[in-house]
Amino acid sequence: MVVGGAPARSEERRGGLGLRRAYASIEGAAADSTACVAHSCTPNYLHFEQASKLLRAGKHVLCEKPLATDTRESDLLVKLAAECKRAGAVAYNLRYY
């Protein structure tokens, strides 16, 4: 699945990546019961809100760094993943850069 900044961009990316579905919103993606995992590659300020919605919707979440914009939000996401019994992970592609 893919969610872009605009429906047309979502559809363009979906086709380019060979994915089956594109969504106009994170809510639409969260409501898809056929998807079990999401990779959040959005601006930093959206990570907490989107990861929270996806975890509550029963998705495993891989989030690009940073997980959130402060430690309080990071802590809440870790606890939420545990409560929802879902994996939550952070990608550190430039860890030693």
Image (cartoon, rainbow, N blue to C red):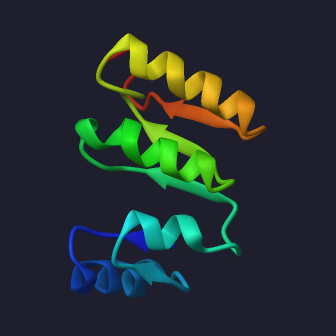
Which residue sits furthest right?
85
Q: Please give the name of the residue rendered at 59% of the width and 23% of the height, measured from the top-left corner.
A: 78
Q: Report whether 17 appears left or right of 54.
A: left
Which residue is found at the position 37% from the left and 82% from the top?
A: 16
Residue at the spot 52% in from the left edge and 81% down from the top edge? 19
Count of residue discs: 0
Residue 46 pos. (x, y %): 29, 43
Q: Position of residue 3 (x, y in %)?
A: 37, 69
**Where is the C terminus found, in terms of image quarters?**
top left
Residue at (61%, 74%) from the top-left corner? Answer: 32
Is residue 86 depicted above or below 21 in this figure? above
Q: Nearer the viewer, residue 20 or 5?
A: 5
Horizontal relation, residue 16 to residue 34: left or right:
left
Q: Percent x, y for residue 31?
A: 57, 70
> Where residue 84 appears, x then y in whole percent?
72, 39
User: On screen, 60 above or below 17?
Assistant: above
Left or right of residue 45: residue 58: right
